[in-house]
Amino acid sequence: MENLKARLREDMKKHLKAGNRVELMTVRNLLGEINTREKGGKTPMEMDDAAVTSLLQKEAARRRETAQTYSEVGAEDRAAAENSEAGIIEAYLPAPLDAAAVQGIIDDALDTLREEGNELSMRSMGQVMKLVSAEVSGRFDGKKVSEMVRSSLA
């Protein structure tokens, strides 16, 4: 399976050939941001898919917030452009999970820890969160996951 950066690069070429200006500009900006993060700072580093996914989530959220601001001041055309970019970015993100699916993942993690002979209490929060976060990362709000784990342990 190809990684997210490679997919973005391939899509940039496709959009360039197809003449999709908005998609091309959006993907090009994302790749520029990734490049800046990788080469900026004291030591260059390679972003993995998890880091790229996190960046894409932030970029999509930023565009949605900007669109909201434009809507509030009556600049609907600019709001639509921001929402369009956010939609393009969100297409690269993993499908979001619903609360029921997350609860199922939490229950599986609790069962796994019990099978390993762990006595579960609020002190087990870190262990449970580690297992759950690995599966839901980027697909559900972390704060809500934490609350759900806490209530499951209580």
Image (tube, rainbow, N blue to C red):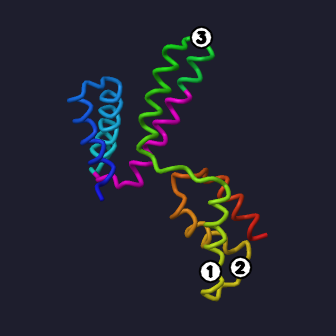
**Where does the C terminus fall, quadrant-wise?**
bottom right
Q: Which residues are magenta?
A: 45-65
Of residues 7 and 131, the one nearer the viewer is 7
User: Which residue is at a point 60% across and 80% down the rendered structure image?
Assistant: 112
User: Which residue is at a point 67% across and 53% down the rendered structure image?
Assistant: 144
Residue at mark 3: 74
Q: Position of residue 62 (x, y in %)?
A: 51, 32
Give the alpha-carbon distance from disc 2 to disc 3, as whole Å.
53 Å
**CA neighbours of label 3 inside 10 A, class few (<14), some (14 to 19), many (20+):** few
On residue 150, the disc is none
- Residue 83 in the magenta stretch? The answer is no
Q: Earlier in the sequence, mark 2 or mark 3?
A: 3
Asked if disc 2 and disc 1 are in contact, CB closer than 8 Å, the reply is yes
Q: Position of residue 43 (x, y in %)?
A: 28, 51
Give the alpha-carbon distance from disc 3 to disc 1, as whole Å.
53 Å
Residue at mark 2: 120
